[in-house]
Amino acid sequence: MLLPFFNKKKNKRGLIGVDIQPYRVACAHVVHSDNSGNKSGNKPGNKPKLKQCVFEDVAADANGDISAVTQTVSNVAKSFPLGQFFCNSSIDDTSYELLLTEAPNVESSELKQAVRWRIKDQLPYHIDDAVIDVFEIPGQQSARAQLMYVVAAQQQNIERRVGQLKQAGMDLQSIDIYELAQRNIAAILPEDKEGVVILHLNENSGLLTITRNGVLFLTRNIDFGVNRLATILDTGLDAGAEIELSLDELMEGAENDDNEILTEVDIEPQADAQTPVLNEQGKLIIDEVILEIQRSLDYYVSHFNQRPVNKVILVPLVIQVPGAIEYINEMLGIKAEMLDFNQHLDIAKPLSRELQARCFVAIGLALRQEV
């Protein structure tokens, strides 16, 4: 969304998505069919093709050192066709602000300037240091004032990310945000036509989005992640939960005739591992998520005058939480199910749950189709 970069001719049918975290780097390469549909996804039957996805953890003793993270980016990037495709990345989710505001009644050429003036007092840094972008919310049917999203980030954070990618030999097309990466994934789901909620919990936080027809209507941050769930599971992480996979292990996947590498990781639980269960403490935590989903759905229906959403999609977790889906179904009254990329992408070999969880954002970044 922020700062499109074009300086070379590349294959525009696909992208390499790069998700850079202080503790992990993930990359995914997606190619769209020639007869793909509009920007919200391919025509029915023409699934985007996931050519490759891998991740690597940053050295445990790096303590967020920028050079260690940059080296990890370079390590992961080596296996991707950098000379043929642009990449799309994001900055850390703590390094930008996403604001929902009334759309100024000005000409489109004056929109960004009008927005800069409106949000200047809402930023923790001077507006002159900010990079601003906007995106509208088509399809608003409310008689209330039209809303739009504003993305703001410090210039230095953008420049730092650009530098990391250039050092890894990547040609950057754009800097995006997590909310739109999640929107890109929603757009390949059949449920998106009528509206869908996607809930993604990473290690220490989460993101909830409501989309419809490829449009991001609502986004909410969740202030806890799977680590909190892990602490209250009866058997904790030792019960077949968090599994660290190195890049070398991932790259042991099969190569097909087109030299496409798709990682398949078969993880056998330990014989003496007990299955974690959703205990009462776990239900209390899930209740917080359910309440946030319900509040968001109510706002979506009342403010945007949209039909109710009838599907909640949960992103695969790095730990198993048996009973969570059933509990959400029971308490929310809306069908909930776990996302499985194997059903929605053209993939040479099935992706494990752990790999889907680790590469979720990278795949969303690679699915971007806007210019």
Image (cartoon, grey):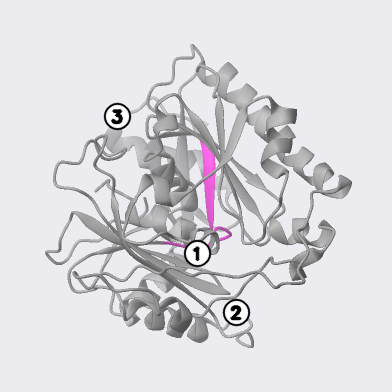
Q: Amino acid at mark 3?
A: Glu
Q: Is residue 46 left or right of residue 135?
A: left
Mark in front: 2 vs 3 = 2
**Element type at mark 2:** loop
Q: Residue at x 36, y 62 (%)?
A: 349
Where residue 270 appears, as percent x and y from the top left, is: 69, 73
Question: Looking at numbered disc 1 in the image, what kind of residue is underneath it?
Answer: Leu
**Left or right position of 328 against 169:** right
Q: In terms of secondary structure, where does tag 3 sit?
A: loop
| Residue matched to label 3 | 107
Q: For the residue carrying disc 2, how many other residues have a C-alpha within 10 Å: few (<14), some (14-19), or many (20+)?
A: some
**What is the span of residues highlighted in magenta in the rendered image?**
90-100
The residue that disc 2 covers is 64
Q: Is residue 96 magenta?
A: yes
Badge number at residue 355: 1
Residue shown at 35% from the left, 36% from the top: 111
The answer to whether residue 42 is magenta is no
Residue 326 placement (x, y as % from top left): 70, 37
